[in-house]
Image: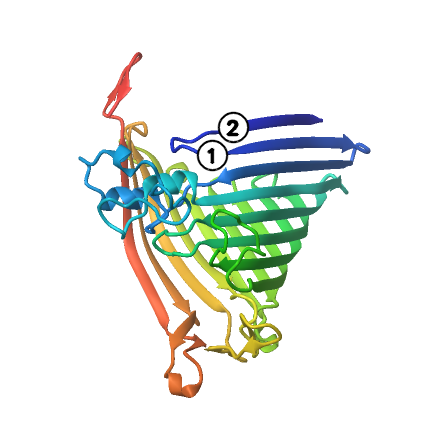
Amino acid sequence: MRASLTRTDNKWIMPSMGFERTTASVNAGYKISSKIRVSSVVNYTNKTSDNLPGLGYNNHSIAYFMIFQNPNVNLDWYRPLWRPGFEGIDMIRPYSSFIDNPFAMTDEIKNGLRSNQLTGNMKVDAQITPKLSLMVRSGINMNQQARDQRRPRDINRYGQGFYQTQAVYSQEINSDFLLTYRDAFSRGKLSLSASVGGNTMTSQYKRNDNTLVGLVVPGVYKMTNGTGNPLVATYDADKKVNSMYGLINLSYRDKIFLDLTGRNDWSSTLPQENWSFFYPSANLSVILSDMIRMPQSISFAKYRLSVAQVGNDTDPYRTNKYYNRSDFPSSAEAPTQLYNLHFKPEIATSIETGVDLGFFKNRLRIDAAVYQTNTKNQILSVPLEHSSGFSSAILNSGEIRNRGVELVVTGTPVKSKNFTGI
């Protein structure tokens, strides 16, 4: 068993910003018998912050302030933050009301976070026979966050102040198994590895927002200190995907390699008539330099060819009419996006072929390939005329082709006993 505990105190560069993080990890294993082993990994992370920095192109980011403020301005001219006699009500802006006071960004505009994350799994490995093994595993990733945003009065976006709390919960559970058979034939010339497995994935996402626009008493961040009633909004997203897959790996004299895979998914986010989709792949590689006599200058030569498909589903709740939340109590809003009862999974088909060549004892390597990818049944949101009652619709739209050539050249022209360089 192995355990660890890590503590991080980050004070950042900006004043009044940073976070504290504590991480605990336990890794344990137990051999029940000569053929069965149980192992588990658990990680827990607690992260707290009274103020995370604002990012992006917005008034609450210090980088945004630096864009519009002349560099020759003395920042002390922004002190004190509030005009005398109007503390918490009238902010000092000596040059422009478009940008907020930088000391408000560090001392008054707050982005708090309380986060608890738990990840872990338990696995059982069983050697059924010398050639047959079984792996069974289940894992969880659970995250719970409490966020709050505090905005004082007289800032650019919220002149009367703003307060919001968010409770976010997300969880994903994956359980899978893999049955593997390994063998060799023709006196070891041909080796085989074949596997069959399955996976079930269940995810949940829940969020509750309480928003208050306008503070009666400046600097008091309570849901009861509002010029109006708080707006309450909830968000939910549940998804489940079941999968079965198989893999075959063949090797002949460690010179010719063939890999075959196939996977079938059943996704809850697709219409029932199309929620099952299959996507295979095949990959062939040949070490030519081990099979054919090459010129002395060629140290290594490999040819590869692959054909693969990848399937993709969509977000939840797009196959039926679901009413949206409303800011008014005991009410709902009709959806603005037209649902689709019959859309299909997105399928991308790729083909690639190329060579990997090594020259002069591999001091010069060339990797060249050509590829093409065709994607069909793309799940897209397309605009609609508002007279239809909807602003957009979910459709399988079009087919996209992407093709190209890749060339990578690496080399070591200078190489000696004490020095290697390019």
Amino acid type, callout 2: Asp
Which residue occupies the extreme front position in the image? 85
Q: Position of residue 239 (x, y in %)?
A: 61, 63
Check whether the beta carbons of the residues at disc 1 and disc 2 lie within 8 A of each other. yes
Q: Position of residue 7 (x, y in %)?
A: 57, 27
The numbered disc on residue 414 is none
Query: Relative to the observer, which residue lies in front, 48 or 353?
Result: 48
Q: Which circle's residue, 1 or 2, is located before the other in the chain?
A: 2
Give the quarter of the figure containing the N terminus: top right
Distance CA(mark 1)–CA(mark 2):
8 Å
Amino acid type, callout 1: Gly
Q: Is residue 185 visible?
A: no
**Which residue is labeled 1 in the image?**
18
Query: Relative to the observer, which residue lies in front, 315 or 390?
Result: 390
Around disc 2, counting alpha carbons within 10 Å, would you say few (fewer than 14), some (14 to 19), or many (20 or more)? few
Write the residue at 57% across / 37% down: 47
Q: Position of residue 201 (x, y in %)?
A: 64, 57
